[in-house]
Image: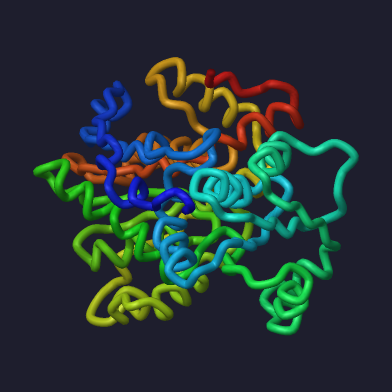
Amino acid sequence: MPPTLTPLFRHAPSPLMALPSPTLARAGVRLLIKRDELLRIGPGLALCGNKWRKLQYNLQAARNAGHATLLTFGGAYSNHIAAVASAGAAFGFHTIGVIRGERPEGLNPTLRFAEGCGMNLQFISRPAFREKHNPKFQERLKEQFGSFYLLPEGGTNALAIHGCRHIVEEVELQTPVFPGYWCCSLGTGGTFAGIVAALNGRARALGFSALKGDFHNGEIKRILAASAAPSSLWKGEGGAQPWEVNTDFHFGGYAKYEPYLIDFINGFYQQHGIALDPVYTGKLFYGLFQLIEEGYFPKGSTILAVHTGGLQGVAGFNERFGELIDVR
């Protein structure tokens, strides 16, 4: 019998902490951090935070449907690839990772971890990777690998949105003051969409894009429209849209950074003991503190920031760029 999925559903909420900071005191605002990076299971640092939330109901659906294999897609440094591999090792699924690009001579830490968890890594060309949504391409994968449960790149689907709603539900039970602003980093947008859906207009949500470009607004509207979210959340019916995407702090996209971002990440860890990653949460907190210093949030505001995890990627970043981040 494969291991039970019960620990994914019966767990203590991730901690909620108020961050002490002179910057916050000067601005007259309160910052709460939802420490989802501490919601962790399985080998390594991969299956935690928003990856836990996104995979939770997908793993249940795969198990209920009798699937023994999970197949998904991702880049060579993908947090999602690592999380699916970790989930497979923890809960007895075979896993297949279809990776964008040719197999390198030496695997990076993310891919070494995934392979060490038993994931079958299949490297395909970038043009072929762009066909991942094509039903004929997916049928060829089934012919090659047999039956599998398909997880999209990044893990965002309706079941992932459902899992991410629990972030809001937990916070409601953890603090008597409902935050007026909810902030998180954006990749595929699934975590943010889940938060927006659960808030249902009761507070303002602010997403910090980790990617260059202005596509997230349309993507989040598409995700909300495809879910059970009220149309007012993606059409702005009866008033202003209760969420927005900030594109000022992407630093050029994945694997892009500036020295002052690295300084902020290292300084944040030294001051608060909270590790951040350079792709998602480092950009989130850097951007959030910039907005706080600029007076974006009214005095007296309670702001909540979700630490979504992503720390497994620090090792690959350091191997690639030279041990820049020290959060050990």
Coordinates of residue 237 in the picture (x, y in percent): 28, 82
Is residue 175 in sight in this rendering?
A: yes
In this view, 62 is above or below 32? below
- Identify the residue shown where x is 53% and y is 18%: 328
- Identify the residue shown where x is 47% and y is 36%: 286
- Identify the residue shown where x is 20% and y is 43%: 301
Q: Relative to the observer, which residue lies in front, 56 or 17?
A: 56
Compared across the picture, whether 201 is left or right of 154 comes to left
Q: Residue furthest front?
A: 1
Coordinates of residue 270 in the picture (x, y in percent): 45, 15
Q: Residue furthest right?
A: 105
Q: Count all numbered tags in the image, as a single digit.
A: 0
Q: In which quarter of the image is residue 145?
A: bottom right
- Identify the residue shown where x is 36% and y is 44%: 306
Coordinates of residue 7 in the picture (x, y in percent): 34, 46
Is residue 210 in sight in this rendering?
A: no
Q: Relative to the observer, which residue lies in front, 197 or 297?
A: 197
Q: Residue furthest top?
A: 270
In this view, 184 is above or below 283? below
Compared across the picture, whether 135 is left or right of 39 comes to right
